[in-house]
Image (cartoon, rainbow, N blue to C red):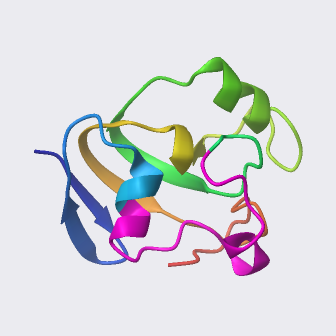
Amino acid sequence: MPSITVQGKIINCQRGANLRQVLLKNQIPVHNGNTKIINCRGLGTCGTCAVAIKGEVSTLGWQEQTRLSLPPHGPETTRRLACQVKVLGNLTVTKFDGFWGHGDRLNY
């Protein structure tokens, strides 16, 4: 069973679980500011749940790659959309500031 380290907490989940759903279920915010209200609810179209991830996760799909290639993200980003990520192993997740989580200051 993989574990996710985030905000100084350790959360266990099933292999293959959706990262966004696991975080929200455990009261870990994946959105900043007004994006808590204005987001695509996990469809991968808004890009507001971008997080930095260290660990084993699913590969980047075409939909996530397309959204992350658009501003304010860009093709060089190393962030992932929590709503599109499947947890495959132990992870460390970091959320950054900015409307889309694209900033450089930690938000956790």
**Residue lying farthest left?**
1
Instruction: Give how far across and how far down residue 56 sits, in percent.
Output: 31, 34
Residue drawn at point x = 53 percent, y = 38 percent: 84
Q: Main secondary structure of the magenta part?
A: loop
Q: Can you name the residue that lies furthest to the right here?
A: 71
Residue 41 location in percent, x, y? 64, 54
- The quarter of the image holding the N terminus is top left
Going 41% across and 49% down the picture, which residue do you hit?
19
Q: Is residue 84 magenta?
A: no
Q: Give the residue displayed 65% in from the left and 41% down from the top.
A: 43
Q: Is residue 75 visible?
A: no
Is residue 47 among the parts visible in the rendering?
A: yes
Left or right: 56 with respect to 44? Answer: left
Query: Looking at the image, which is closer to me, 80 or 37?
Result: 37
Image coords of residue 99 (percent x, y):
79, 68
**Residue closest to the eye, 42 or 72:** 42
Q: Is residue 75 above or below residue 96?
A: above
Q: Is residue 27 above or below residue 11?
A: below
Write down the region rendered in magenta: 23-42
Q: Position of residue 68 (x, y in %)?
A: 74, 37
47 horizontally vs 83: left or right? right
Q: How many marks?
A: 0
| Picture quadrant of residue 60 | top right
Residue at figure coordinates x 42%, y 55% from the top left: 21
